[in-house]
Image (cartoon, rainbow, N blue to C red):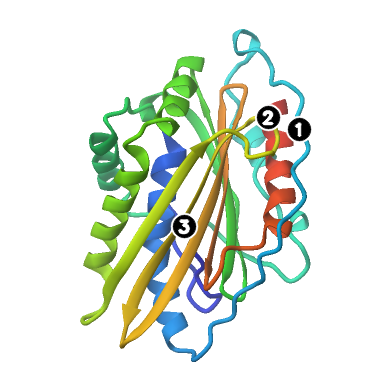
Amino acid sequence: MTIPSSAPRQQGPARGMQWAKRLLGVCAAGCVVAVLAACGSSSPTSPSTPSGSPLSSSSPATPASAATPASLSQLKRIVLRPADLPQGWKGTPYQPDPNDSADNAAMMKCVGARNTDSDKVAEANSDNFALGDASISSSASSYRSQSDLDSDVAMLHSPKLSACFEQMVKKQLVASLPAGATIDSASITITPGSAGGPANVVATGSGSIKVRVNGQQVPVYLTVAFITGPLIEAEVDTENVGAPVSESVVNPLVATVATRAVKG
């Protein structure tokens, strides 16, 4: 979801099982501000959503047996940089989510997955890049062993995952919305596979949260691409009010991060 430039959002940091938990943190921290900003305008601006060209396939990653955990400096070279974004996108520094630990515990309990946080070696987060109501960010983390990645990828195949996201998002938003505001619906779907993108995109996610404030329904959309490399987990997140961020913008950015991650 997008946070307008006048109110930078906070994002949950990349971490063990970073993909699933970060998506929850992004939504919970960003939705309220996005909704309130949209309600202040009679017609929130939303980009069009043309279908982008399929992402090109990436070369196979370094074999796990030959990999060593990436350092912080390596991870910083994986995440999005200002030069990667189209003209007009403005970056603001990443801010950690103060509710991260509690959110992680609740999500892991809901899905029933192993928490790999203790095996995380380093993490890097890009700026939050915004244009109007649209926002794009990325993260990358390294882990001690391939079993950590295997556990986290298995989580993305869990039939409980989408329902747990919806449950947690609703709970967090209800506690944050102003008096009189209600959640009409929350729908989040995680789909294993590259969706036609690089081979190391292991899953994609999309969702929408529809909140009603003062009689006005405001839809906030999010997408995420889950990416792997040699002992690396990375992702690209988007948020926007009114419509998903255009695939013609997102797909090249996902391909960029995926190409960097596969090299480690």
Disc 3: CA contacts within 10 A as few (<14), some (14-19) or many (>=20): some
Residue at numbered disc 1: 57
Q: Say which residue label 3 marks.
A: 95
Amino acid, disc 3 = Gln
Where 30 sits versus 231, above or below?
below
Element under disc 1: loop
Query: Gap between marks 1 and 2, in whole Å?
Result: 5 Å
Q: Amino acid at mark 1?
A: Ser
Position of residue 258 relative to residue 63, above or below, is below
**Image quadrant in which you'd find residue 32:** bottom left
Q: CA distance from mark 1 to mark 3?
A: 32 Å
Task: Look at label 2 and name its amino acid.
Answer: Ala
Q: Which residue is mark 2?
A: 199
Residue at 44% across, 28% down: 152
Which residue sits at x=74%, y=43%?
A: 256
Of residues 184 and 57, which is closer to you in this image?
Answer: 184
- Residue shown at 75% from the left, 44% from the top: 54
